[in-house]
Amino acid sequence: MFDIFDQKIRKAFSESAVQYDVLAQLHREIGRELTAKLKEIEPSDVVLDIGMGTGWLTKRLKNYFPDSTVIGLDFATGMIEQARKQDSDFDIVQADARALPFKEDTMDIITSNLAYQWMDNLMQSFKCCYSHLKNGGTLCLTMFGRQTLDELFVAFEQCKGGKKSLPFRRLASRDDIKQAVMSAGFHNVSVDYEQIKVRFPDMLALIQWIKGIGANVNDKEIFIGKELLAKANDYYNGHFKDRLGIYATFEVVWVQANK
């Protein structure tokens, strides 16, 4: 059963599905690099893409693994509907990533592009992956890490807003992610990262972008007052801006491990 927080995440991503591909160029760039890493893995019988969104990466995986069964999984109805419009022969399943509806020990590769940062219990989520991989199978994914949107958090904290003033929360650190993967039973665990600066016209545009991709979720509704919003915007412009506009850090964490 989905709890209230899960339902809010599902609703947010479902409502953003139609515009998701327009706003998700960052996701695609990272997805291209993820695809390149997956190409280095030996041919596989079954490949599972968790949190497939509109199916862009899943379609690429089917192109690179034409003889494999490629499955795209997402729990948001809107994303599933958009994925079904893809001209590809990958399988589509609507399900919760923490309760995969497959037999255990059946997957050769489980991958995911920028979805696991939304999981509230990483170790349990990775355990689910572990149990569904064959012995020797590979987990290869990306997720946003703790330094993501650091400037936005700093702006609100410096303006007396505090961490709880934002409708989204700090994400897991690299150490927390690695520990969760290892605690799930994986070995040959590799955790790497890179930081990407993305430009926006102003802080308000950044917040709208976050809302646009369905990421404006928290465990309770939060109202940001106009005064606090204006102060944070001024602070952001004064500290995190160059000639191209304000910038936001996205920490991309790369995870690869074997069962």
Image: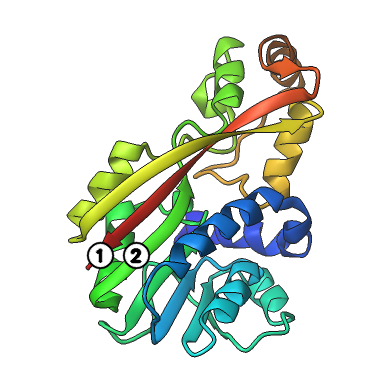
Distance from the alpha carbon under mark 1 to that under mark 2: 6 Å
- What's the residue type where badge 2 is placed? Leu
Give residue 258's mark: 1
Give the quadrant of residue 100.
Answer: bottom left
Q: Is residue 63 above or below residue 9?
A: below
Q: Is residue 137 visible?
A: yes
Residue name at image x 48 percent, y 76 percent: 95
Where residue 210 appears, x then y in whole percent?
67, 42
In the foreground, 177 or 59: 59
- What's the residue type where badge 1 is placed? Asn
Which numbered disc, 1 or 2, marks the residue that appears first in the sequence?
2
Q: Are marks 1 and 2 in contact (CB under 8 Å)?
A: yes
In the foreground, 184 or 190: 190
For label 2, the SS is: strand
In this image, 148 relative to 138: left or right? right
Residue name at image x 39 percent, y 61 percent: 140
In the foreground, 118 or 248: 248
In this image, 81 relative to 177: left or right? right
Where residue 142 appears, x then y in whole percent?
46, 53
| Mark count | 2
Q: Is residue 95 above or below residue 160?
A: below
In this image, 166 relative to 235: left or right? left
Residue name at image x 68 percent, y 26 percent: 247
Q: Which residue is mark 2?
A: 139
In this image, 219 relative to 120: left or right? right
